[in-house]
Amino acid sequence: MDARTGKVYHSRNADTRLHPASLTKMMTLYIAFQAVERNEISLDSYVKISANAAAEPASKLWLRKGQKIKLRYLIRAAAIKSANDAATAIGEAISGSEAAFGKRMTRTARALGMDSTTFKNAHGLTQSGHLSTARDMSILGRHMIYDYPQYYNLFSRRSASARVATVRNTNRRLLNSYKGADGIKTGYTRAAGSNLVASAERGGERIIATMFGGSSSAARNARVVKLLDMGFARAPSTAKLQKPALPHYEADYLNSSTGRRVTAIKRSLRPVTRPVQKPGGQIELIMAQVSETKTQPNDILRALKAATSNQIEPQVSANETPAIVKKGSPRARPSKLSFVSTLIINDQKAKEIGKSLYRAWSINVGKFNTRYQAERVLVRTALAEERTLNGADRTVKARATGYDAIFRGLTRDSADLACRRLNAQEIPCYTISPS
């Protein structure tokens, strides 16, 4: 593939779904870069290693349960050494659990155009349904190069410090032997064979070559070298750079019990002021106009309010064609107004959805001896978890036993996600329901 344009010069069985092995970590790292750039998490955030992460088989950094390590070192270990424990820890830190992170990986794959890929874990060890293709991995490699160039150099490092150890690149043989090679990722399991997504740049030309199912790392590298040579031979010396489009971004606001994603409404539709007729004049044009907004026409909160109350509110759709009335006197206002409700919803379901979206949940991040200590922790936590706690109110509640540090004004799902992320960093946190 010509990385500059995305044009494929050669393919064979490129759409066959196979085990990607540690090529999976390319997506784990892509989402980690995305999360850092979107302020979901910081490179200097400490991640507490879970029992699940610590138990991952080699290749690994041999992290211990309960150990705390900065995210930047986990990224280095996953990218360079292909450490499975580091990859799992990254996923858990960002999404709260490995399963939730796997769903985010698959969502991101779809947004990138990887239509034949499904992820189940962050490391790539063989698991039922965890499959990808050579074409999809080439697409991911291209996005890695152009979407996050500030991090791409990581894949060309022969070694790096992961704090607890110096890690060596699993792809160093190709990096050392092929002119212009600067990445990207190797992979191997018995079920997958030897896999590789490689990229090299020469004189402004950049080629991506992907291979699945090599019989050995040497045979795999030899084949990839031929593919790279073929690409450089066929690629034009000059080509207009056509960077891939950035994918739609959605952070992890997932309901831990249902796995359903909840997105916050940015702005509600508001009714337009009724036109006023001037004395002695005529209204020639009457138009119900709704200002442009990113909120979907079916305002969830507005609908829930109407469904759970005895009042019926008229609904205005942003997609309705403005009504145009011919020139002449307006019709007389009818003596009775009738509204047609098209919302049918189970009462119990409405209550459940309402509780999930209603911003009346809180989280407690600790009890302290002084008000000052509680306020200080609230500020630090708000800065560290800006994405999940955005818009929440910081409150210190005095009790006989001390001062509670509380964030109020959250939905159930954002409160749950915030606590899972804080607990992963060994910060105490528990949710408080509206009741």
Image (cartoon, rainbow, N blue to C red):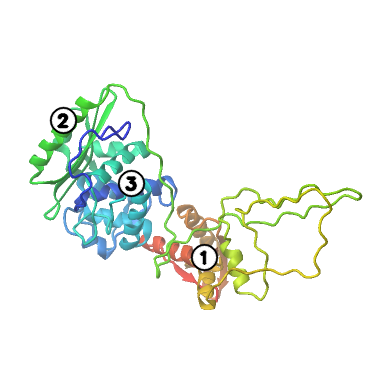
Amino acid type, mark 2: Tyr
Q: Nearer the viewer, residue 354 or 235?
A: 235
Earlier-in-chain disc, 1 versus 3:
3
Which picture quadrant has residue 54?
bottom left
**325 on left or right of 110:** right
Q: Quadrant of the C terminus?
A: bottom right
Crowd around label 1: few <14 · some 14–19 · many ≥20 (10 Å): many
Query: Cβ–Cβ below 8 Å for labels 1 and 2?
Result: no
Is residue 162 visible in the rendered structure shown here?
A: no
Q: Nearer the viewer, residue 189 or 397?
A: 189
Where disc 3 sits, the SS reads: helix
Compared with residue 270, is residue 247 higher up or lower down, i.e. above or below? Answer: above
Where disc 2 sits, the SS reads: loop
Total marks placed: 3
Earlier-in-chain disc, 3 versus 2:
3
Q: Which residue is mark 2?
A: 178
Q: Quadrant of the N terminus?
A: top left
Q: Residue furthest right?
A: 280
Q: Which mark is residue 30?
A: 3
Residue 422 location (% of width, % of height)? 41, 61
Is residue 389 visible in the rendered structure shown here?
A: yes
Residue 122 location (% of width, % of height)? 27, 55
Q: Which mark is residue 411?
A: 1
Amino acid type, mark 3: Tyr
Which picture quadrant has residue 240?
top left
Query: Cβ–Cβ below 8 Å for labels 1 and 3?
Result: no
